[in-house]
Image (cartoon, rainbow, N blue to C red):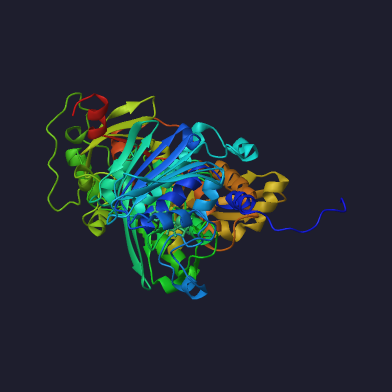
Amino acid sequence: MPAEQSIRLLSDAVANKIAAGEVVERPASVLKELIENALDAGATQIDVNVAAGGRTLVAVADNGSGMSRDDALLSVERHATSKIRDVDDLERIATLGFRGEALAAISAVARFRMLTRRAADIAGTELTISAGMLQDVREAGCPPGTCIEVRNLFFNVPARRKFLRSEQTELARLRQVFNVYALAHKDLGIKLTVDNRLVAQVAAVSALPERLRDLFAWLTPENLRPVMCCADGLQLDGYVGVPALARTDRAEQYVFINGRPASAPVLAGALREGYHSLLARDRHPVVFLFLTLDPALVDVNVHPAKREVRFRNPGVARHVFIEGIRRALSGNAGGVVPSGGAVAATILNRGVLKHDWRQRNLAGIEPDAAARVVYPRVKADLPPVPANVGTFPADAKAGIPGAQPAVAAASTSPWAWFRVLGQVGGLYVVMETEDGLTLMDPHAAHERVLYERLMAQIEKGAVESQRLLIPETVELSPRDALCARRHLDLLKKTGFGIAEFGENAFLIDALPACLAETTPRVLITDIVAMLDESGGRRGAGMLREESVAQAACKAAVKAHQTLKPLEIEELIAQLAQAEMPYTCPHGRPTLIHTSFRELAKRFGRA
Ligand code: ADP
Ligand code: MG
């Protein structure tokens, strides 16, 4: 170290540039700060304008309070804020910003222009700064409110500019920030223009359902479930996407706490748990959730980026999220009126079906000629939907469900009625439902049906077990045998009659009744492999039984079989009664639905 070097205070310009590193990471963080300032200034309308993924321009215009000339000059100084005065104020922050850092930091690393006017002033102020150096202050004519333009972000900090991602990626982040505020502030009008094209606009008066429609073109209302859940003074509402909407990233998870966009470690876990058994491990649900609680029960000032919150009682928050999501997603039995006339009626009246749809001989219920289902080629008269049936999705026709979430949630059977049109690809079942075209993967559907039936029995501690006419010996590899031996009790609890039979062999004399169609060898081998795979990770209790049930049902359905019409209808009816009809227990979708509305759109009608 050269001798002449000593400690010295950094100039403001340098300090600001360093601070910019914390506050301003990328165009999206600029947008966030500018929108928050506009909101703090009481804006009811915000116009956002970006270009080239925010590299060349991020601009926010608001109709908020505006600033006097003096305040405008102060606002870009470091630690200049109108929002707090002393330490005590920190305890009762109502505004989004309070550090007084953003404008100083942003203007230190960009070409910055502000136009601002208070409604009562005759003239406004225009202020330009480049790389933290004040260039010009002058009177200017402008509407009341503030408009801030940030151009050429990081033009003076090449190292940071290098870290910006592709235009598309930066734009996606900008878009996300925009969405967050458009969702959080239900009485805010907000508009987004990208490269001179208007891409999103929500009106100040629009409620959440319309906001979702205006912000997310890809989102169809029938893919959302309303959430409404209260517990211990916490209230959760909003919408969650059906499992089929899930994505490989968390980009479309919008969670708000007391109106603020928020994240907390406990929330990620709660979302996963809410979708438990509905999503594969690497899929993330789409959610729009709003939690309301006493502000004293949550700490928002944990993270400088201000998104992370800490709950006084994380357990309660977690519980509300899990409950709310599960209730919203769970289907409801009843209300299923298939079109197959007599056959369909018998299916429904028979209640729980004793046999497997793959079974070739439907002993005792061979359909008589009159009741045989014929796949209609032309559109027949559709059966009327009985008045007492919860028609789903009734709400889909009126836009996104919203009016009465409780009612809508209680009628989440995937359809009010269905009509099977046939099978394609030797596998997929094609059917019409009251509001569109549905494809069903019968294997995934069957897995779901079996899984829920088996789990229900396991939970009650009363698994129906069926004795095999001829007990079977199954020889396992030494490793699998070890695992099977270790989990013998678990297997018995899930309905297997299993006993050790020599070194690596087991005698199987009973199977869970709902899986009785499967060969014991296949079943046991698959389950043991699964236990082995997950044995270390899975905890005690229910999870182990769940994984056994999952493996068992998967094995039971593995064999590809052609379905008879009657069997298809039965399966559909059973799936409609499932608690979670939309995915198999491993998270693959059972149903793919295209609404008539979507079809009309694609055909250019309407
Ligand atoms: P903070 O928001 O933490 O106070 P900022 O640097 O973001 O810090 O803003 C500094 C000050 O500038 C704010 O406290 C506010 O008084 C003023 N200000 C910033 N943006 C606006 C705006 N859009 N309308 C009115 N005042 C603004
Ligand atoms: Mg601010």
Residue at the (39%, 35%) spot, across then down = 441
Closest to the observer, 149 or 183 = 149
Closest to the observer, 35 or 130 = 130
Please tell me in which quadrant of the rendered image residue 438 appears: top left
Task: Give coordinates of residue 375: x percent, y percent.
Answer: 23, 28
Looking at this rendering, what residue extends furthest in the front direction?
Answer: 138
Quadrant location of ligand 1?
bottom left
Viewport quadrant of the C terminus? top left
Task: Give coordinates of residue 98: x percent, y percent.
Answer: 48, 62
Say left or right for 174 vs 233.
Answer: right
Say left or right for 391 vs 212.
Answer: left
Query: Disc count in the image?
Result: 0
Please tell me in which quadrant of the rendered image residue 293 appears: bottom left
Closest to the observer, 234 or 231 = 234
Residue 471 visible:
no
Task: Give coordinates of residue 153: x percent, y percent.
Answer: 53, 39
Residue at the (72%, 50%) spot, across then down = 503
